[in-house]
Amino acid sequence: MKAIVVGSGAGGCMAAKELAAQGVDVTLLESGRAFKPFSFKTESFEPMRQAGLFLDERMIQMLFPEMRIDKAQDGMVHVIGRCVGGTTALATGNALRYDRFLADIGVDLDAEFAELEGEVPQSTGHRGNWSPLTERLFSVFEDLGLEPQVTPKFMEDPARCVACGKCVLGCKFGAKWTADKLIEGVPGITVETGVTVQQVVIEGGRATGVVVKRGFATEMLPADTVIVAAGGLGTPVILEASGIPTSPTLFVDPVLCVAAKWEGASLDRQLPMPFVSEQPDYILSPYFDWLSFFFNKGWRMPQGDIMSIMIKMADASVGSYDGKTLDKPLLDSDWEIIAGAVDVSHDILEAMGIPREKTFFGTLNAGHPGGCLPLTEAEAETLHNPALPPNLYVADASLFPRSMGNPPILTIMALAKKAARLAVS
Ligand SMILES: Cc1cc2nc3c(=O)[nH]c(=O)nc-3n(C[C@H](O)[C@H](O)[C@H](O)COP(=O)(O)OP(=O)(O)OC[C@H]3O[C@@H](n4cnc5c(N)ncnc54)[C@H](O)[C@@H]3O)c2cc1C
């Protein structure tokens, strides 16, 4: 049997690995190229930054093509990875199980999460690398009753982590685990990069292959089974082009940082999100936001002098992406959640001695898209939307029934593992 998997992120690499384990001959198609970490010293851009030459977040793609930036109509900045490993290459490495909303509709991923424990390196053993300031922040979170938890991290080798603070620019030290490790050296998987899938070909009610663009050439690649895992923004575009309707229920988990000047904070040289406080509709965590640092006027101060608390919230499922226009409005209910989280962030900074009037915001951004082919209770066992032909599956956050407001990689992998098995069962 020959299968095509579209996209080499968390979902695609996990699906490819599972298919290969079942003896399937897998071709993994990726529009990006092999990942290279951001190779410049961030300090070297200081004169340009101070001169205000970093005008638009999309400019980062000239320096770092693996980081793909889209802007929604309302200006929210959307970040995804376009490379082998997908967005895991840009992730801060948080390894959190978060499948409550899937369990609510009857999706049972216990077995898959149990397997992932032995399959993907996860570690909380990074506390020895924390700075005194991070420890102090942890205590402040505790004192405010925010119940911070040390974040489990996807770490290939914790000993190699030098806490450089640049996980989201790619790990140069081989400390961070990324999804491409799942398929490294696995027999039966061929990875083709620079290949953009345009549509799945459906004939006689079955998927017979995919149409791809490779350079200027367009060709059809045949397959017995197709799994689309092009990410929460990529998958709906391919499905729509294949005549499969998706739903305008995009969520993205918006991120907003509440920051302040703090000389010598050195948050830029700390492991990002070393601990997390989980609240009903959002999480809070210390985080140095490189996008705000480069592009937000309010952040024009030395990179070592910024203290920042990240809010990541679960947004309403309203929005769509057609490959050109990203329509992702935030509703009043979203802004209410953000306002509440901003208040708590101010409390944290006040407890550190920073008055509210001295704080400033980061740039509103997001990097957890999904929800455009949401699973329902009826699909809890099959993970298969009835609009899809029987031999076409989706294996990414498009299947999530709603936003989690939490890091999704682990849950995407658990879902992809199960979907891949069902695809060939
Ligand atoms: C800065 C940042 C930090 C993050 N940190 C964390 C974290 O610490 N923990 C966590 O759990 N989550 C984190 N996330 C979110 C997480 O990384 C993503 O949600 C997750 O990796 C998505 O996995 P995926 O496989 O569904 O999609 P993606 O990783 O987006 O992979 C899809 C792949 O498909 C490719 N593709 C798209 N369209 C096509 C096409 N037409 N043809 C061929 N290939 C295509 C893309 O190039 C990409 O490589 C972070 C996100 C960002 C932006």
Image (tube, rainbow, N blue to C red):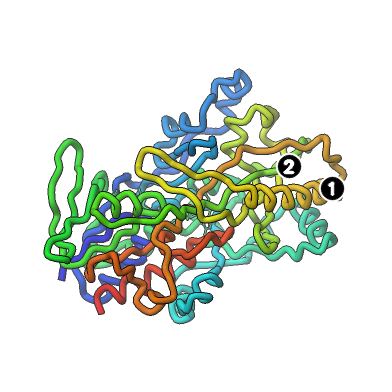
SS at mark 2 in the image: strand
Q: Is mark 1 within 8 Å of ligand 1?
A: no
Seen at 52% across and 39% down, the residue is: 77
SS at mark 1 in the image: loop
- Judging by the rendered image, the residue that carries numbered circle 2 is 307
Seen at 73% across and 42% down, the residue is: 307
- Judging by the rendered image, the residue that carries numbered circle 1 is 352
Q: Position of residue 16 (x, y in %)?
A: 29, 65
Mark with earlier residue (2, 1): 2
Residue in front for this viewpoint, 207 or 36: 207
Q: Position of residue 313 (x, y in %)?
A: 62, 54
From this view, report whether residue 215 is shown above or below residue 160: above
The residue furthest top is 51
Type of amino acid under label 2: Met
The Cα–Cα distance between marks 2 and 1, rounded to whole angstroms, is 10 Å
Say if residue 292 shows up in the picture: yes
Q: Are marks 2 and 1 in contact (CB under 8 Å)?
A: yes
Location of the N terminus (image quadrant): bottom left
Q: How dense is the environment of label 2, judged by Cα within 10 Å: few (below 14), some, or many (20 and up)?
A: many
Q: Is mark 2 within 8 Å of ligand 1?
A: no
Type of amino acid under label 1: Met
Say if residue 286 shows up in the picture: no
Residue in front for this viewpoint, 249 or 407: 249
Residue 182: name its quadrant. bottom left
Residue in front for this viewpoint, 136 or 295: 295
From this view, report whether residue 26 is shown above or below residue 292: below
